[in-house]
Image (cartoon, helix red, strand yellow):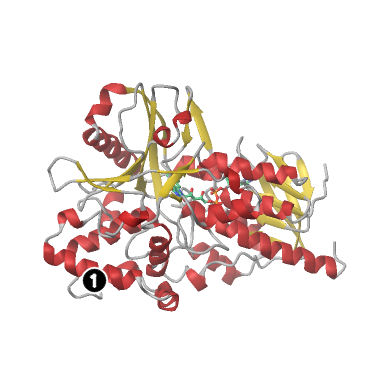
Amino acid sequence: MADKYEAIIIGAGPGGVTCSALLAKKGLKVLLLEKNQRVGGKGITVQSKGFKSEMFAMAGVPAHEGAWLEAFRALGIEDRYRVVAKPLALVSRHPGEKWQIVQTQSNDPDQQADPLAPITWCMNDKEKEISLRILAEIFTMSPERIAELDDVSVHDFITRYEDLPKPLYGFFAYLANTSMAGIIETASMAAQIRFMLSVMQKPLGYPKGGFGRMMEDMAEVLKAHNGEVKLRARVEKIVVTDGQVEGVLTKDGLFKAPIVVSNAGIQPTVLKLVGAEHFDRAYINYVKDLLPSLGFVCMRYLLNKPVLEYALYQVWSQQAWWNLEEYKKARAGKLTEDVIFTVSVPSNFDPEMAPPGKQIVVVGATSSPDPQDRMLKPVFAKMDQQMCEVFPEMVPHIESRVGLVGPAQISGISREQVMPGRGGEGVGLGMSVGQTGRNKPSARAPIRGLFYVGFDAGGRDLMGTHQAVDSGMNVAEIVHQYHRGKQQAGGK
Ligand SMILES: Cc1cc2nc3c(=O)[nH]c(=O)nc-3n(C[C@H](O)[C@H](O)[C@H](O)COP(=O)(O)OP(=O)(O)OC[C@H]3O[C@@H](n4cnc5c(N)ncnc54)[C@H](O)[C@@H]3O)c2cc1C
C-alpha cells in the first residue's frame, strides 16, 4: 500500500501530538502513526475496574501558564485546558523516626513565599539563613548568567559555596533526582534553574481527565483539520534515499511523505529506524553519547474508600537522595535507607478518575533506566514498604495493587531500547552538562526532511511533558517553514 502525505509524525507522545495537530492546523496533510492503542506516550491513560490514571505518578502542570496552555491556545482549544490545582504535601523524616507531613505548599502564589519549604524543618537557623541567601542568588540570576551554567553540573555549582549547608546539598540532590530525573554530578545546573523557575512557587495541578485526555483533545484538532491518526501502527523503518526522507514502513506497508517527524526518541530514530549507515560516524557518536535521564518504577493502589487527604505528595528524606556514589551502590544492591517517591491521587484532583466512594493512588520512585537493572526489584519493594509506613491507614483499604511497571514498560510504551543499559528513561535524553540550553540536540536531523520532536530535541529546558510540548510547538514551526521553502522552490 502506498499513500501520500505532506508530513508523517511517528509517535503520539506530547511532542508528536502537539506537532502533528499544529501542522494540520497550518494546512499540511498530516498522518500521525502511533504504536500504542491510544495516544498519550508516557502519559497514556490506563483503566482498571473503573479506575483511571496514568501508568505513572504524574502531576505538576502550571494552572495558569506554561507550554501546555500555550499549545492549547495555538490550537484554539484553550477552553479545554482544565487543570485542577491543589496543594502539595511534603512528607519526610529524620533517620529512623516516623514519617510525617512536614510542609503543605499552598497553591496560592501569594502564600508561597518560602522556597525553602521542603527543607527548613530539618535546618538550624544559621543553615536557613545561608540557604536562603544562596537560593535568592539562584532565583534572581539573569538568563545570560543561567546560560553560562549549561556546562556546569548542579554539584559543581553549589559546592562553590564554601559555607553550603549539608541539608541544602541534599535538597539539590533530591531536586535533580525528581524534577530532572538526573544525578547531581551530571545534571546541568542551567537546566535545573530553568526547571525551578518554570514550576516552583506556581499553582500546580493535574489535568481534569488526566494527561492522556489532554493529548486526546489535541488529536481531535488534528482530525478536524483533515489529519489522520493510525493507532497500533508501529513504524519499523524510516525510508531514506540519497539523503532524503521518502516515507515510513509499517506492517501495513509504505506510507510516503517528503517530511518525517519522529517522536520515537533520537537514539531509536537514528540507530534503528533510519540506520547508522545513513549518518557519518561523528554524528552517530554524538547521538550515542547523549545521556539518558533516570527511569521510574511505579504502581497503582486501588482503594475501597478515599483515605489519602492530599492530591499530591512528595516523599523524601536526607537519607534518600542519590548522587553518583549512592547510585552506583544502589545498582550494586545497596540501597539508601529511604527512597524518594511521588504520590499522585488522580481522584482527589478529579473525582471521575475513580468509581464513586473509591480512591486511586499512583506512586513512582526514581530508578535506573536500564530495563534489566537488578536495582529495580529492591527499589520497588522499598517504595511499597515505605508507602505503607507513610500511610498505614491506607493498608486495610487496598482493594488491589495494579500496574507494577518499570523501565521495561516505559520503553514498551514509548522509546524502544537500542542502547545497552538504557531505553527505560522516564523523561528523555539531553539534560546533562553540555547537552542543555544552546547545546541541546537540534530538531533537524542531518537528512533532508527528517526532524525530531519531543523531550529529546527542539524544546526549552522544562519539566518532562512541558519540554516535549514546547518542542512540539517549535518543531511545527520549523517544519512548516521547511515545507513552505520546498513549495516555493517548486519541490513536492
Ligand atoms: C513515572 C513518570 C513520571 C513522570 N512525571 C511527569 C510529570 O509529573 N510531569 C511531566 O511533565 N512529565 C513527567 N514525566 C515525563 C514525561 O512523561 C516525558 O518527558 C514525556 O512524555 C516525553 O514526551 P515525548 O513527546 O518525548 O514522547 P513520549 O511520551 O516518550 O512518547 C513517544 C511516543 O512515540 C511512540 N513511538 C515510539 N516509537 C514508535 C514507533 N516505532 N512507531 C510508532 N510510534 C512510536 C510511543 O508509543 C509514544 O506514544 C514522567 C515520566 C514518567 C515515566
Q: Is residue 354 left or right of residue 91?
A: right
| Amino acid type shown at disc 1 | Arg
Residue at left offset 12%, top offset 67%? 126
Counting from the top left corner in percent of width and height, residue 480 is at: 73, 62
Between residues 271 and 126, which one lies in front from this camera angle? 126
For mark 1, what is the residue? 133
Residue at left offset 50%, top offset 51%? 465
Between residues 315 and 311, which one lies in front from this camera angle? 311
Q: Is residue 370 visible?
A: no
Counting from the top left corner in percent of width and height, residue 389 is at: 21, 34
The image quadrant of residue 262 is: bottom right
Counting from the top left corner in percent of width and height, residue 100 is at: 19, 41
Residue at left offset 55%, top offset 62%? 459
Q: Is residue 212 visible?
A: yes
Q: Quadrant of the C terminus?
A: bottom right
Q: Quadrant of the N terminus?
A: top right
Residue at left offset 34%, top offset 27%? 306
Counting from the top left corner in percent of width and height, residue 70 is at: 57, 56
Residue at the limit of the structure toward the right, as seen here: 490
